[in-house]
Amino acid sequence: MKPTPTYANKPTSDNPRDVEAWALAEASRRLLDAGRSPVNEETLRAALQLNQRLWTIFQAAMTEDDCGHPPEVRTNIAALSLLVDRETMARLVDLDVSKLDTLISINRSVASGLTARPDTVAPGQPAPAAQAARPPMAPPMAPPVAAPDGQPPRQSLRISI
């Protein structure tokens, strides 16, 4: 078994949604760092494997009996996790740092959706960014994953990476 990766920073909240958003932001940060030093293939592999492990947790959580998400949300998260799996495997094979944008964008978009607070977001309005300290993030390239009614999912996944 591989050792657990160490983290330069840790989530500042115990709220599961915040922890999930932090994990996605951390995975994005590691992918970005790996992309900045393309000669270090081990750093890229480690970042891709961490991202894959995170999305495998999301995928597995959708199959749990006590998952509180509606079937449509479960299906969307499962489909997105399969896309992340395919993209991650392709990057593990070719180690092409110029093709990390899709994974980074997905992570940032989902993190952005998780940090939005349902009580502060009016329907049809963009979600505000979280105020917690985290690595700077560029604007997401894809819309955040949302429930069918347009609101962010209200239930959270349990993550332990």
Image (spheres, grey):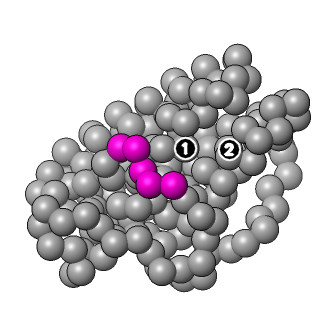
- Counting residues from the N terminus, which is met first, the one under dot 1 or under dot 2? 2
Looking at the image, do the residues carrying marks 1 and 2 touch, with CB atoms under 8 Å apart?
A: yes
Q: Is residue 148 magenta?
A: no
* 107 over 68 or under it: above or below: above
Q: What segment carries the magenta color?
A: 138-142
Q: Which residue is mark 2?
A: 31
Q: Main secondary structure of the magenta part?
A: loop
Q: Position of residue 78 (x, y in %)?
A: 37, 39
Residue, x 25% and y 54% (percent of image)?
A: 146
Q: Is residue 40 left or right of residue 57?
A: right
Q: In terms of secondary structure, where does tag 1 sit? A: helix
Q: Is residue 86 left or right of residue 100?
A: left
Residue, x 88% and y 34% (percent of image)?
A: 40
Q: Quadrant of the N terminus?
A: top right
How packed is label 2: few (under 14 Cα within 10 Å), some, or many (20 or more)?
A: many
Return the residue found at the far top: 94
Q: Position of residue 79 (x, y in %)?
A: 35, 34
Three-letter code, disc 1? Ile
What is the spatial separation of the Cα atoms under label 1 and label 2, in whole angstroms? 7 Å
The answer to whether one can see residue 56 in this image is no
Q: Position of residue 58 (x, y in %)?
A: 47, 49
Q: How many marks?
A: 2
Three-letter code, disc 2? Leu
Q: Which residue is mark 1?
A: 104
Q: Position of residue 7 (x, y in %)?
A: 77, 65
Q: In terms of secondary structure, where does tag 2 sit? A: helix
Residue, x 42% and y 50% (percent of image)?
A: 140
